[in-house]
Amino acid sequence: MYWRQAIGLVLAAIVWCVAFPALADWTHPLSFSNAELARRDFSKQSLQAAEFSNTNLEMTNFSGADLRGAVLSASVMTKTNLHGADLSNAMVNEVTLTEADLSDAVLVEALFLRSVFNDVNIAGADFSYAMLDKAQIKELCKKASGVNSQTGVETRESLGCQ
């Protein structure tokens, strides 16, 4: 009698994993809220959907990191290295990026709500379908150049520069 129940549970688990594979692999996202992460090295790390709210990320290295869907909210990002990082679908709100390196970064469909770009390097960055306001776009277009090595999209084209 118990073996029938056990087989039923195993079959139900198999059906669940086949029908919902993304949910079967789901893990809780990392949270670095209110953390002091200045000068840390997160290069080439998988940080999908990680939360960096109200975090000091000054001079932190995210080069080549997978930050898809990450939340970078009200954080300090002075001289932060995001070279070649994938921030697709990331939410970067109320962040001042000062002297940050966004070169060759993938920022597709990222949200930049009330964020400020001060003296950033965006050579080769792909901003396709990113949510930016007109003032941000105007400022970024002044320095936009290059082609993203991962997506093949020109930075000026991705920003809609005239």
Image (tube, helix red, strand yellow):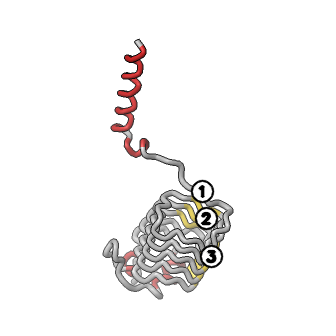
Would you place residue 9 above or below residue 81 in this image? above
Name the spot of residue 118 as percent of width and height, x first. 58, 83
Tell me which corner region of the image, top left, top right, bottom left or bottom right, holds residue 156.
bottom left
According to the picture, the residue beneath numbered tag 3 turns out to be 58
Tell me which corner region of the image, top left, top right, bottom left or bottom right, holds residue 107.
bottom left
| Of the image marks 2 and 1, the number of the one nearer the N terminus | 1
According to the picture, the residue beneath numbered tag 1 turns out to be 31
152 or 64: nearer the viewer: 64
- Which residue in the rendered view is the most extreme toward the bottom? 142
Q: Residues within 10 Å of mark 3 (few under 14, many from 20)?
A: many
- Which residue in the rendered view is the most extreme toward the top? 1
According to the picture, the residue beneath numbered tag 2 turns out to be 73
**Which residue is at a point 61% across and 72% down the rendered structure image?**
57
**Which residue is at a point 34% across and 77% down the rendered structure image?**
149
Screen quadrant of the C terminus: bottom left
Q: Cα distance, mark 2 to mark 1? A: 12 Å
Name the spot of residue 151 as percent of width and height, x first. 33, 72
Q: Cα distance, mark 3 to mark 2? A: 14 Å
Name the spot of residue 110 as percent of width and height, x first. 48, 66
Would you place residue 28 above or below residue 158 in this image? above
40 to the left or right of 12 = right
Q: Amino acid at mark 1?
A: Ser
Tell me which corner region of the image, top left, top right, bottom left or bottom right, holds residue 157.
bottom left
Name the spot of residue 7 as percent of width and height, x first. 37, 22
